[in-house]
Amino acid sequence: DGGITQSPKYLFRKEGQNVTLSCEQNLNHDAMYWYRQDPGQGLRLIYYSQIVNDFQKGDIAEGYSVSREKKESFPLTVTSAQKNPTAFYLCATGQGNQPQHFGDGTRLSIL
Amino acid sequence: QKEVEQNSGPLSVPEGAIASLNCTYSDRVSQSFFWYRQYSGKSPELIMSIYSNGDKEDGRFTAQLNKASQYVSLLIRDSQPSDSATYLCAVLSYGGATNKLIFGTGTLLAVQP
């Protein structure tokens, strides 16, 4: 079944803790993206990667880190430096000038 | 800063009416334009893509693009309560080897039965 798989669906973070959100795709797309969405807000780009072993900061990268060791995988770590991490996190993939497609998202909350 | 602007709404229309959603963008060299639908608590799903000036129809949906006016719109004919959602306009911005999708903040559509 082709698509984008994000896990977990819900995640809770304690103070001072780093948490990692998973994003896996089997669409063979080169580009992968991470967005953050706050209630009633649009999507803001955190990080993106056009090829393996390379990634760039988006508009709100502070407090986040990523890796792209495999084409299929683009995990996002929300570090303790991110002071307001509660949000809906969306992973997307894309190819050239084609539209991006999204996973089902991970909802992160603070304990 | 490249921007995409949408009226946040809510836009309320009666069932069976035409809903008209509008979007303007600032980057003149943008070539690709998309409309996504997002139900509450869900991820965005692509409903229309448009790449050239004019109209593109797909079922009850019509996307309209006017590059000279930097304007893209989405018409939903025979609106149904199930169309009630937030509609996100997205514009592909080229930056050398990097393509980035710039999203508007979305328009909330409410179709009244």
Image (cartoon, rainbow, N blue to C red):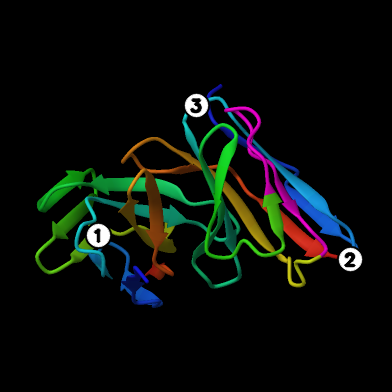
Which amino acid type is marked by label 1? Answer: Leu
Among the 4 quarters of the image, the one containing residue A96: top left
Which mark, by number, is residue B74? 1
Q: Let me know if marks 3 and 1 both belong to one chain.
A: no
Question: Which residue is found at the position 63% from the left and 27% from the top?
Answer: A70
- Give the SS element for disc 2: loop
Among the 4 quarters of the image, the one containing residue A1: top right
Quadrant placement of the C terminus of chain A: bottom right
Q: Which residue is mark 2?
A: A111
- Give the SS element for disc 3: loop
Residue B67's place in the image compared with A41, above or below, is above
Label 1: few (<14), some or many (≥20) within 10 Å? many
Residue A46's place in the image compared with A48, above or below, is below
Question: x%, y% of residue A86?
Answer: 73, 66
Which amino acid type is marked by label 3? Answer: Leu
Q: Chain of mark 1?
A: B
Which mark, by number, is residue A76? none
Question: x%, y% of residue B98?
Answer: 39, 46
- Range drawn in magenta: A66-80
Question: Which residue is found at the position 31% from the left and 70% from the top?
Answer: B14
Q: Determine the CA span between mark 3 and mark 1.
A: 28 Å
- Judged by its main secondary structure, the magenta piece is loop
Label 3: few (<14), some or many (≥20) within 10 Å? some
Q: Determine the CA span between mark 2 and mark 1.
A: 40 Å
- Give the SS element for disc 1: strand
Residue B96's place in the image compared with B26, above or below, is above
Q: Which residue is mark 3?
A: A27
Question: x%, y% of residue A4?
Answer: 57, 34
Which amino acid type is marked by label 2? Answer: Leu
Contact? badges 3 and 2 (CB < 8 Å): no
For the residue pair B47 and B110, the one nearer the viewer reads as B47
